[in-house]
Amino acid sequence: MALNTEEMTLNMGPQHPSTHGVLRLELRLDGEFIVDVKSHIGYLHRCFEKHAEAMTYPQVVPYTDRMDYLASMYNEFGYALTVEKLLGLEIPERVEFIRVIMGELQRIASHLVALGTYGADIGAVTPFLFCFRDREKILSLFEMTSGARLLYNYIWVGGVARDLPPDFLRLTKEFVEYFKPKIKELNDLLSFNKIFIDRTANIGILPKDVAVNYGITGPMLRASGMKWDLRKDDTYSVYNKFDFDIPVGDGRMGTVGDSWDRYYVRILEMEQSLRIIEQAVEQIPDGDVSSAIPRRIKPPVGQVYGRVENPRGELGYFIVSDGSVNPKRIKVRGPSFVNLAIFGELCKGHMIADVIAILGSIDIVLGEVDR
Amino acid sequence: MIFDFFAKLTGSEILASIISALLPLFLFILPFALIAVLLERKVSAHMQDRLGPMRVGYHGLLQTIADILKLIQKEDIVADSNDKTLFNIAPLLVFAGSYAAFAAIPFTSSYIGSNINLGLFFIIGISGIVVIGILMAGWASNNKYTLLGAMRCVAQMISFEIPTLMVVVTILMVTGTLNLNELTEIQSGFFWNWMIFGGAVPGIAKILLIPFMIIAFGVIYISTLAEVNRTPFDIPEAESELVSGYHTEYSGMKFAMFYLAEYANMFAVSAIVVILFFGGYQSPVGYLGNSIGLHWLIPIEQLFWFTFKGVGFVLLQMWLRWTLPRLRVDQLMAVCWKYLIPIAFVNLLIVGLITLI
Amino acid sequence: MKEYFNNIYLALSTIFIGMSVTFKHLFVPAVTIQYPSVKPQLPTRERNRLYVNMDDCIGCLQCARACPVNCIEIETVKKIPDEDLGLTSNGKKKALWVTKFDIDIAKCCYCELCVFPCPTDCIYMTDVYEFSEFERGNLIYDFVTLTGEERKEKNENYEKFMVEKAAQKEAELKAKANENKDNSQDKK
């Protein structure tokens, strides 16, 4: 006897605990299996690009904070680099070192949120709180430097807002020492847990060529086995002065490019970031941090594209200047937005629980997807 | 026993049976749920380097009472498209199912709701009502998430009854009884008479039984964990996928019923494990009442030991919950059909052979 | 078959490793604090509620111009010549009455861009972070120290002064015109 079955449409989100914000997923289900996924975005659209046209160049900085609110420092970093490229500014070396330290701390903080929420999505709540506990320590470092915990407005065009507070370097060193054993603890508790591996290995496999074709960047691309990191391949700031590796996914628990690889690449990246911070803290020169900040930013007519390796991938700013104090156009290439594009492709044939596992491993921030 | 005592006191058997039926609810399950909810929050908090509830009473001792007061005040929301009858019956059914299991559980040698010969069988049978209640809740809510949760829950609970039953049969082969009181009495004496240490079986068979009893204990503990929907088997209410599973649409006291049922169930399955493998209410080291000659002290001691062991296993459930991630629905089935059932079956065969010695 | 037992072994061993981690944490002191009763020590650079020291404000509008969300509204009136507003603490001469200095703290994005351009360091961010209100209107902070009447008075003074000035000017012009007329008549 043939049973009369039909597909079920399930709307996951925009209010759902694990769509990481206000993403709406329209799932077509055959029982528990996914037939098709459509993602609807735009619930958090705040017109960043349009707003920027009415702002002067320094005023855009607080707006960039609010795109990827988990990696604010890096958004400012990218924006500042791009505008400096447009202006042809020479930046004091101390500023570059401060920016790198901030950027790498921010990378750890952002990855901690990604890993923690990923654990929570899979059902393990304790690692989530452990990750947030350590992230708070980084945020305290940011708070003592810039005064804010989330939206810093610290890295400015031509410099940084303020010099490092006197205790900063010592506390950063202490944090690095504190954090190293915590990575091992996280590995014990979550990464190598058999249930966690079963849930994530061989789920949402993203082959290298598909990843490249979709323009995917960041840890997600590296998990697919592609050694591509803008910090090394299109080096900016003073990253060429440091010795660090680019971790890639090796399919240790399943296939190269599965969710577990995407998860584990982030853990390895945190270790590399710690290495960079250690070196930067040792080598940081003295000097003035605000000498290169221009009084009035009025770039020449022209256009520029600048890109940095955000915790989530390639964050690019395309700025068109018409010679006035306001940018004529700012276009952002957000890594979350581009990485999300492949989501539907990855989900096909998996189960509902895997949708969560895959979405968590992509690590989107809706603030940046919608901007 | 309690029933006779009340029958004599009130002179009416109906009244006596009502009183002795309500006794575990008011003396045990409600206080236990109150404490267990707080315990769960405190245990999870301390595992996560937090403090948990701290405001209501000393270290948040009265937090659960405050929560219940809040839940009572809440509006009882019934959506227009809900199937109202089923929607209202479901929480009652779920609670009744888990509560009925307490009828056959011997708390002490002198208090057992109903000393029936098929006690163990009754508990496993009656907990089937919970499955119906959950499916009802999921269906009546008219919500896709609840329906998915309910379907998962039913599939899971029915599958995991098989390994549970296999282990029960294993015990049955060694002891020859399903009466929980008798089962406990067999394990009297010191702790080496507990089933986990081979029971009170004479000779070499006892030593041979120990490893297989430990395996049997592992199997039944894992499968009861799945039956009460605790992590790593909490997929019916997986909050990251299905929001809250079959009780998404419930609010106020109806939600509290599900909650109460969950905690009552947690204790019920722990109690079964305790009775089967850890000597039920038997003290591991002998009774104080016996040694100082106060015989009325013995039931109190027994109640203490029973609760102590039961809460110990509940704590273990909590510990697991705050450590582990959650399985996927097909992996859950694989755990049941590929691992637990074959292991339980082979175990059953071996234990059967050993008892022939 | 080997994989089968390996799976069981892996599952059990990793679960025990995880459980030992959580067990150890049962005895680690909590990292959280009991917030309203215990408050964290905030760093000196803390960026919270804005405050304006009106004694030092010269009404230069730089903060309002720097603000990316336009949450600062300032209106100023020029002083009349016989008024002396005194000096700011860093020795700048005040030339304007500030009759309106409203900060809509609900709009504020706490970016601190207004603080840096201030020539007298009179606008700054404090570490006060508990200032929620039930009414949104209460979040519009008025920093002007003048009373309503005084503000009106300053405005009127200035207008009166301008009117007088205009009248004076007109009178001068008239006088000049008259002189011219006289002159021309004289020439005739």
Image (cartoon, coloured by chain):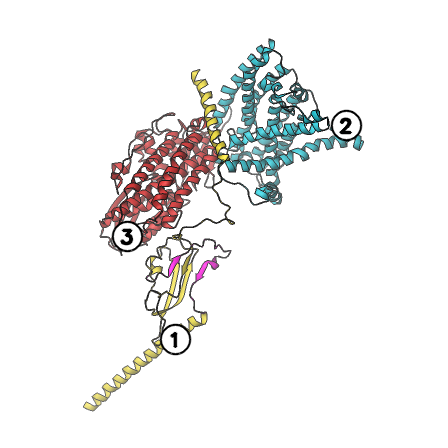
Chain colours: A red, B cyan, C yellow
Q: Is residue B167 above or below residue A205?
A: above
Query: For mark 3, what is the residue?
Result: A290
Residue C136 lies within the magenta run: yes
Q: Name the secondary structure under disc 3.
A: loop
Quadrant of the drawing holding the N terminus of chain B: top right
Tell me the residue that label 1 is attached to: C157
Chain holding disc 3: A
Q: Is residue A184 visible?
A: yes
Identify residue for label 2: B4
Residue B272: in magenta span: no
Do the residues bearing badges 2 and 1 touch, measured as CB atoms within 8 Å?
Answer: no
The residue lying furthest to the front in this view is B292
Q: How far apart, in angstroms, are the residues tagged by discs 2 and 1?
A: 100 Å
Frontmost residue, B240 versus A39: B240
Vertical arrangement, residue B85 with respect to residue C80, above or below: above
Q: Considering depth in this image, is A220 or B273 the residue closer to the camera?
A: B273
**Hey, what amino acid is under mark 3?**
Ser
* Mark 1 belongs to chain: C
- The secondary structure that dominates the magenta segment is loop
Residue A26, position in %: x, y? 44, 36
Magenta residues? C119-147
Q: Image quarter for residue A324?
A: bottom left
> Is A203 on the left or on the right of B254, as rendered?
left
Point out residue B333 in the picture as x, y percentages from the top left corner.
Answer: 50, 23
